[in-house]
Image (spheres, helix red, strand yellow):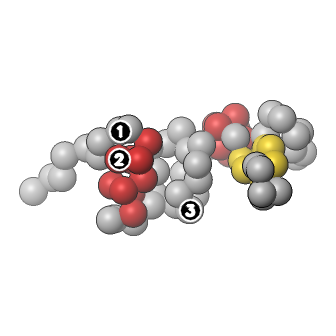
């Protein structure tokens, strides 16, 4: 990804912060582990317990823990 386009890859929220879009993350190709608002990768690289909290907030449930 060589360039970012406002409204496609990012937008500014009501407080002026840059928010990366789902499209940006899909083009990047992986979860960075920072708990991004529009992460399409189920927060797979976010360490627990943060991942479970983020998934719950988003209305998803984490996959079952393997023994």
- SS for dot 3: loop
In this rendering, the count of numbered labels is 3
Give the label, 3 or 1, closer to the camera. Answer: 1
Q: Of 34 and 19, which appears nearest the observer?
A: 19
Work out whether residue 30 can be spotted: no
Where is residue 52, by image quadrant?
Answer: bottom left
| Residue 64 pos. (x, y %) | 19, 46
In the displayed structure, 7 sits above or below 66; it is above
Q: Which residue is mark 3?
A: 34
| Residue 53 pos. (x, y %) | 36, 56
Please give the label number shown on residue 56: 2
| Residue 37 pos. (x, y %) | 58, 48
Residue at 34% x, 65% y: name it. Answer: 48
Q: Is residue 4 left or right of residue 59?
A: right
- Choose the circle earlier in sequence order: 3 or 2: 3
Q: Quadrant of the N terminus?
A: top right
Q: Which residue is mark 1?
A: 60
Label 3: few (<14), some (14–19) or many (≥20) C-alpha neighbours in 10 Å: few
Residue at 18% x, 52% y: name it. Answer: 65
């Amino acid at each position: 990804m060589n360039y970012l386009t406002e409204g496609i890859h990012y937008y500014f929220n009501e407080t002026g912060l840059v928010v990366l879009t789902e499209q940006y993350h899909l083009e990047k190709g992986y979860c960075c582990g920072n708990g991004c608002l529009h992460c399409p990768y189920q927060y797979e690289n976010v360490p627990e317990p943060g991942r479970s909290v983020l998934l719950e907030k988003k209305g998803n449930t984490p996959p079952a823990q393997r023994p």
